[in-house]
Image (cartoon, rainbow, N blue to C red):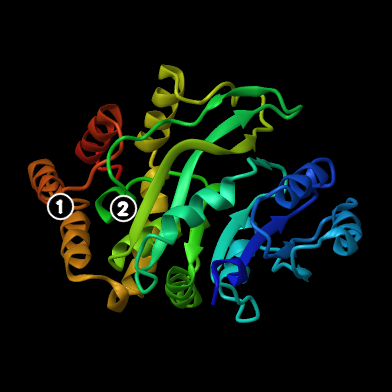
Amino acid sequence: MSKQDQRIAILMATKDGAAFIDEQFASLLAQSQPSIDLWISDDGSTDATTAIVEAWRPRWPKGLLTLVDGPRQGFAANFRSMIIDPRIEADYYAFCDQDDIWEPDRLEAALRWMRMQDVDIPLMFCSRTATMSKSGSLLGCSPLFQRPPSFRNALVQSIAGGNTVMLNRTARQLLAMASVRTQFVSHDWWAYLIVTAAGGVVHYDPRPLVRYRQHEANLVGANVSWKARFSRLGRLLKGQFADWTDKNLSGLAVNRDLLAADSAACLDLFIESRSGGVFRRLSYLRRSGVYRQTLFGTLGLYFATICGRV
């Protein structure tokens, strides 16, 4: 199969996105890749979203455009329904939100890296995003992470939005197998966890390849200010992070057979760090090698461990 014949499936979740979905479709059409199938799972829109999607069907020249009914159980369940859908066949799979704008080389950048890797290894590409306001004004960029992606990082942090993620066929098959067995908190974090847990490779591109639309008034700028950092620390200490971790660990437990030996050993040490006395918890956390991307984040992780909030 030639590179030109390799197909990409874009998995888009929609829910009342009529105000911005035309802009997103236009940016998908502008992608440099010629063979792209669109799969749109609508989660019960009450506006004109599905009508706009149908209007794009005769205008989509790159491949198939398929609209399906979502499970109507929230965004995570909607993406899960597409991850496990056996009808979706492609060589590469990209997640997509309804209200972003993709840079023209967003897919090309991912393919360029993936085509240099072993196709039999689960591969995941992700990147920074440029943040924009509801009206489309650019605000800044998401944090620039420097430490390497790994399972030790994925246990305590999701490094990139799902709107930047692309998977190769091997990674999608792995993720589908894991997702049939369990639900998850967020498709992007779950993909990062499963791919790295199984010994796959994740590449984080420092360039912002997606313009991510933020709708809430308090989400200003690149969300990397000290105020934003302390806000995340506050949520950590309130136990929200522990609830998410519980769900991730539950999902990993039923997929234990998919884990590489090193990942399984790290997971066991991390689980031990969540119980017992303070010194015991800190000892197991240190031995696990688990880390967040920034020094402030890692210090916050250790502080939350002391407080029993991980």
User: Quick one: label 2, few (<14), some, or many (20+) residues within 10 Å?
Assistant: many
Q: Is residue 286 visible?
A: yes
Residue 22 percent across, percent down from the top left: 82, 46
Say above or below: 137 vs 192. Answer: above
Q: Position of residue 202 (x, y in %)?
A: 36, 54
Residue closest to the eye, 60 or 215: 60
**Taking 243 as reference, is 290 left or right?**
left
Q: Secondary structure at mark 2?
A: loop
Give the label on residue 288, or none: 1
Q: 115 above or below 214? A: below
Please state, as top left, top right, bottom left or bottom right, where the N terminus lies in the image: bottom right
132 vs 167: above or below: above
How far from the left and from the top, in percent, is residue 282? 12, 43
Upstream in sequence: badge 2 or badge 1: 2
Q: Residue pushed farthest bottom?
A: 86
In the drawing, what numbered circle is on residue 155? 2
For residue 253, what is the image quadrant?
A: bottom left
Q: Residue at x 62, y 36 (%)?
A: 211
Of the pair 164 and 61, the residue shown nearer to us: 61
Question: Which quadrant would residue 259 be assigned to in this image?
Answer: bottom left
Amino acid type at image mark 1: Ser
Q: Quadrant of the C terminus?
A: top left
* Measured Cα–Cα span from mark 2 to mark 1: 10 Å
Q: Residues within 10 Å of mark 1 (few under 14, many from 20)?
A: many
| Residue 185: % across, % down | 49, 56
| Helix, strand or loop for disc 1 | helix
Quadrant assignment, res 41: bottom right
Picture residue at 66% right of the left edge, 50% below the top = 97
Q: Which residue occupies 69% across, 68% down?
A: 71
Residue 247 visible in the current orientation: no
Q: Amino acid at mark 2?
A: Leu
